């Protein structure tokens, strides 16, 4: 049986302007890397290509798409503001970021 939950929420058609730090964005990017590291490189390529061209087919793809869109929007806005820079990150075999630097 389904339950109805009541909560304060943001209407879907609303646009929220927030400030996001580079540190928080880095954590989102690390989360995406970690999330993707659970798949083989071939699986990652297949998933990325699939979600570029059509709706996600399962929960994994749906949530990955949400994360990637959020990161893209933050990076797009930082590019408009002239603060997007080339970066480099070193990742271990478990997907954990070991070191990052600006290029």
Image (cartoon, rainbow, N blue to C red):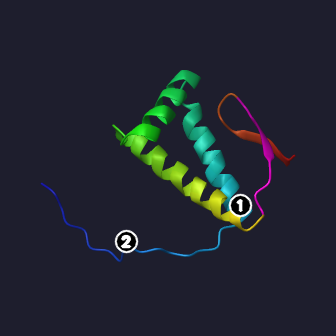
Up-down: is 5 above or below 85?
below
Residue 2 vs residue 50, the one in the foreground: 50
Mark 1 element type: helix
Residue 80 in the image: state x and y as whole percent.
Answer: 69, 65
- Depicted 17 relative to depicted 73: above or below: below
Residue drawn 48% across the image and 33% down it: 49
Residue 45 included in the magenta stretch of the image:
no
User: Which label was assigned to residue 79?
Assistant: 1
In what element is the residue under mark 2? loop
Mark 2 closeness class: few <14, some 14–19, many ≥20 residues within 10 Å = few
Picture mark count: 2
79 vs 15, left or right, is right
* Residue 61 as seen in the image, left or right of residue 77: left
* 87 over 22 or under it: above or below: above
Q: Position of residue 60 (x, y in %)?
A: 42, 39
Name the side, left or right, on which 59 lies relative to 16.
left
Quarter of the figure with residue 20: bottom right
Q: Quadrant of residue 100?
A: top right
Pick whichever of labels 1 and 2 is earlier in the sequence: 2
Q: Residue 13: which numbered mark, if any?
A: 2
Residue name at image x 65 percent, y 35 percent: 95
Residue 2 x %, y %: 16, 57
Q: Which residues are magenta?
A: 83-92
Rendered residue at 36%/69% (across/down): 12
Decide which of 69, 29 is in the foreground and name it. Answer: 69
Q: Quadrant of the N terminus?
A: bottom left
- The residue under the point 58% across, 59% down is 73
Mark carried by residue 65: none
Q: Position of residue 48 (x, y in %)?
A: 50, 35
**Disc 1 and disc 2: Cα gap in Å?**
24 Å
| Mark 1 Cα shell of 10 Å, populated few (<14), some (14-19), many (≥20) | few
């Amino acid at each position: 049986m389904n339950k109805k939950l009541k909560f304060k929420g943001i209407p879907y058609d609303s646009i929220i302007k927030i400030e996001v730090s580079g540190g928080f964005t880095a954590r989102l990017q690390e989360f995406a890397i970690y999330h993707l590291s659970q798949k083989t490189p071939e699986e990652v390529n297949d998933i990325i290509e699939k979600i570029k061209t059509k709706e996600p087919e399962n929960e994994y793809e749906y949530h990955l798409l949400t994360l990637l869109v959020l990161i893209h929007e933050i990076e797009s806005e930082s590019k408009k503001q002239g603060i997007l820079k080339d970066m480099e990150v070193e990742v271990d075999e478990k997907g954990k970021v070991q070191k990052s630097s600006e290029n």
